[in-house]
Image (tube, rainbow, N blue to C red):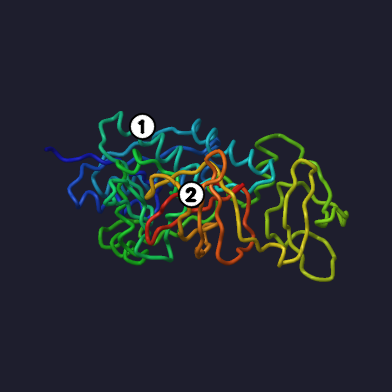
Amino acid sequence: MGKKTVVVGLSGGVDSSVAAYLLKEQGYDVIGVTMQIWQEEDSCTVEENGGCCGLSAVEDARRVAQKLDIPYYVMNFRKEFQKQVIDYFTREYLEGRTPNPCIACNRYVKWESLLKRSLEIGADYIATGHYARVEQLPNGRYAIRNSVTAKKDQTYALYNLTQEQLARTLMPVGAYTKDEIRKIAEEAGLLVAHKKDSQEICFVPDNDYAGFIKNSTGKTIPKGNFVLADGKVIGEHQGIIHYTIGQRKGLNLSMGHPVFVTKIRPDSNEVVIGENEDLFVNTLICDRVNFMAMEGLDGEVRLKAKIRYNHPGAECVISPAEDGKVRVTFDQPQRAITPGQAVVFYQGEYVAGGGIIL
C-alpha cells in the first residue's frame, strides 16, 4: 500500500493551512488547491474583497504550500459557484426566504466539484479546515461530529454532505481548539498563524445583500406594504429582499414600541409586522432533507435541532411529513424560525441530518 493522497482546499487562512500541515505530518501525500470562485476579472475589486477566495487568499495559500513543500494549484470553479451559490442566494431572497449560501457552497462546490476533480487527478481524499470531525459509526454510516470546541463548531453548515462525500473527507482541525491551531501554525512557521478570520459572506463583502441582489440580477425590487397580521396597512417597505424574520432594525415604523418582521409574503409583496411574542412557534416543516447518522425516518425520533448557525439547539421530536418532508416539534417554542434557513438535527455529538425550513 502506497501513501494515500489528499487534496486540501487552501483558503489562505490559518485553519486550512494547519489542516495541510497536520495531514503531511500524518504521512499523507498532500496537494494544496485554492478554489477560484470569485466572479470579478478586475484584480483591484478582487483584492479588496479578499475573503476566502480573493487574490490575497491565493498568495497566502501559495506561500503556505511553499513552506510545507507541497504541490499547489488554483482550480477554476466560477461556473459552479455562480450556479449553485450566487444564483441560489439571489433566487431565495427574491422569493422572500433567507438562504445560507455557505451550506450550498459546501455541498455543491467545495465537496461535489472539488471532490470530483480531486478524484480525477488521482487523490483518495479531500480535506478542509472546518471545525468538525468525520467518523464512521457502528451502523456503517459516516457522520459529522461536533468539534472539540463548541465556540468554533461548524457542523451546522455541513449537514447535507452525502455518504460518498464523507467517506472521502478528512477534517483534522476538528480535534483542536482555535488557539491550539494558531499555536501549531506558529510552531510550523506559517505566516498566516495570526491572520484574522473572514466573517461576512465571501461574495457580499460589504454585507449589503440587497445591493448585491439588485446589481447581480439587474432587477428593480418593488416596494410594498408593511401590514399587521389582520392585513391592516401600516407603512411602506423598501422591497422584500431587505427583510428577514425577527428583524427589528431598519423598519422605520413609529409604533411607539419595538416591532418585528414576523412573516414575508412574496405573492402579495407584503411584510407582516408583529410583536416579539408573535415570533415564537414550536413546529416547523422542512424539505430537501439529508440524513447522515440516521439512514432515514420511519416514525417519531427525539433529537436536538438547531434552526440557525448560532442557535444553541433545542430538544424536539421529528416525524415524517408528506412527500419526504419532515415535521419538527420543539418542546419549547423557538424564536424567529426562518424559511430558507437550515434546521439541523443532532444525536448527541453527531449530525443526524437536516433540511431547509419551509
Position of residue 256 measured from the top left corner of the image (x, y, whole percent): 84, 70
Q: Residues within 10 Å of mark 1 (few under 14, many from 20)?
A: some
- Mark whose residue sits in front, 1 or 2: 2
Position of residue 292 measured from the top left corner of the image (x, y, whole percent): 39, 47
> Residue 354 — which label?
2
Q: Quadrant of the N terminus?
A: top left
As helix, strand or loop, the secondary structure at mark 1 comes to: helix
Q: Earlier in the sequence, mark 1 or mark 2?
A: 1
Instruction: Tell whether 165 sits left or right of 262.
Output: left
Query: What residue lies at 61% left-to-right and 52% top-to-bottom?
Result: 206
Residue 279, picture quadrant: bottom right
Outermost residue toward the left in this view: 1
- The residue singled out by tag 1 in the image is 116
Query: What residue lies at 26% left-to-right and 35% top-to-bottom?
Result: 123
Badge 2 amino acid: Gly
Query: What residue lies at 68% left-to-right and 56% top-to-bottom?
Result: 245
Position of residue 305 measured from the top left corner of the image (x, y, whole percent): 50, 58
Camera-nearest residue between 254 and 226: 226
Q: Is residue 328 above or below residue 187?
A: above
Q: Is residue 110 above or below residue 51?
A: above
Outermost residue toward the bottom in this view: 257
The span from disc 1 to disc 2 (Cα, nearest Å) is 24 Å
> Residue 202 — which label?
none
Query: What residue lies at 24% left-to-right and 50% top-to-bottom?
Result: 23
